[in-house]
Image: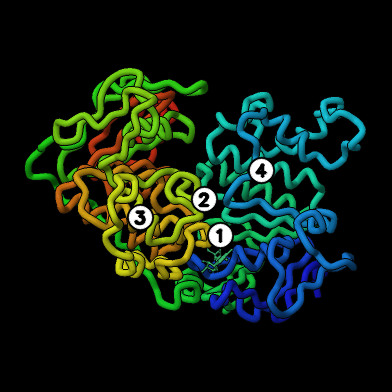
Amino acid sequence: MPDSLVQFEGVTRRFGDLVAVDNASLDIRAGEVLAILGENGAGKSTLMKMLYGLYPASAGEILIHDAPDKINGPADAMRAGIGMVFQHFSLLPALSVRDNLLLSWPRTPFWKSRRNTDTADVLATLAELAPHIDPDCPVGSLSVGEQQLVELCKVLNIDARLVILDEPTSVLTPDEAERLHGFIKQLAGRGVAVALITHKLADVEACADRIVVMRRGRVVDIAERGARSITETVALMMGQSVERKLQRPPVLEKIVPRLVLENLSARRPEMALQNVSLSIAAGEIVGVAGVAGNGQALLAEVVAGVEPLTGGDVLLDGVSIARHNPYDAVATPLGYIPEQPRDNGVVGTMTLARNLALRELAQGNRPPVTGRDLLFRFNVNPPDPMKTAGTLSGGNIQKLVSARELGGQRQAVLACYPTMGLDLAAIEMVYAAMFAQAAAGAAVLWISEDLDDLLAGCHRIAVMREGQLVALLDNSSTLTREVVGAHMIGLTETEAAA
Ligand SMILES: Nc1ncnc2c1ncn2[C@@H]1O[C@H](COP(=O)(O)OP(=O)(O)OP(=O)(O)O)[C@@H](O)[C@H]1O
């Protein structure tokens, strides 16, 4: 029998009437990668947050081997060698990567300046896991995926014997995810236990030893990898089987320009957008592909009017909707799903009803309805309009923002990674809502790192590199991932084929 590091015995956690985790029993063993799968709101994060000391259990017990004291908070957890990397980061954006890692470096005595610590040790994990990240670069200028890796290094630096990763690959590029999979396996090889919360079966295939499936707060299955087929695992997660139905949209009969980006330029300290021009027709879906951090985030923010332009214009049906002056407040008419919706798409302290009515509230109007039907339609769990948005799980926040932005008919939609952190059923639902917008005449601009999805669902694919649009490709049946990938990294198609 392998060594059990942690044992959950009949653990329950309630939030008011809601039972987030219901009588869960399982163990986590030294040197294993335990994947925890389940649909949005299944209770995966809550289960692990109890282990990390963020929430006490309402009933049951969590026993940690060799840690006699009870875990009453994250500081106790870290002392017991348990580290957690969250979906939501805790880095200081204005400080460099090095300073962020120094701040949390556990071996610097408090009387000694952290600046005098030998940074080679502090940076060793970073060098191994993410050699491309410059330690002197401010964290705020890194892509979300890179920030995730820095967060992971912080946790690994505490010499953890159990690392909890909450959906670590949802913000990583395929290359970064592959490197992380390798690193997770190495950690397990060194005897560290890894609890990996994920929606991605690819993560499970790549590195899990055992798989726990949760549904509606309950642990419904625990099995060795390979003991279940993918279809069986998905059925256990969803309680039903889900088919991928993404279909190439119908060919446009007429090209009527609807959302027009004219020579867009904008600047941030670390990124400049240069002369981006693109015309999206009514009913058209244009995907934006690119390696993370090549200007996609800035493009989205200038199109949505969050960031001012330094040049150019954004026209919707011929009318400018751009923000030219930093002092102008703009409520975008676009259906806009931003990157990281917990930070950028909801007000955590407001109810779901008020979050659905943010546009009306911003214009000083009364919110029209409670939005209960929208919450049901977009499967937001719990569908209670009076709940505060900050209490929702990550996936349910994403669904709430989709409900607000895609729930009514829009002239145009700007969707940044709209399915991030969603389970399979929710992904299908969000795509269906986005494609229905196009079918009803909206122009859709869709930023994604999933080339397979872009190839399956777009009319055209624009590729961004270093703040510029470097290619605009018709998505004919001959367009491949390799061709799009070649443009992303600056190879010619012939070089890529060689
Ligand atoms: N602090 C809280 N207050 C109230 N309810 C909460 C709180 N945290 C989580 N919940 C609820 O508990 C349930 C389980 O949430 P949890 O975050 O554990 O799910 P999850 O499986 O991790 O979901 P996701 O994959 O979407 O992140 C959800 O219904 C969520 O709304």
Q: Which mark is residue 402?
A: 3
Q: Are marks 1 and 3 in contact (CB under 8 Å)?
A: no
Q: Please tell me in which quadrant of the rendered image residue 316 appears.
A: top left
Q: Are marks 1 and 2 in contact (CB under 8 Å)?
A: yes
Type of amino acid under label 1: Thr
Q: CA distance from mark 3 to mark 4?
A: 27 Å
- Of the numbered discs 4 and 1, the one sitting upstream in the chain is 4
Which residue is under mark 2?
170
Where in the figure is residue 2, as x and y percent of width and height?
A: 80, 71
CB at disc 4 and ligand 1 closer than 8 Å: no
Count of numbered marks: 4
For marks 3 and 2, give the one nearer the viewer: 3
Type of amino acid under label 2: Ser
Q: CA distance from mark 1 to mark 2?
A: 8 Å
Which residue is under mark 4?
151
> Would you place residue 439 above or below residue 25 in this image?
above
Residue 47 appears in the rendering: yes
> Would you place residue 440 above or below residue 258 in this image?
below
Specify the quadrant that holds the C terminus.
Answer: top left
Residue at 31%, 19% (x, y): give it: 275
Q: Please tell me in which quadrant of the rendered image residue 191 appears.
A: bottom right
Q: CA distance from mark 3 to mark 2?
A: 17 Å
Q: CA distance from mark 4 to mark 1?
A: 17 Å
Type of amino acid under label 4: Glu
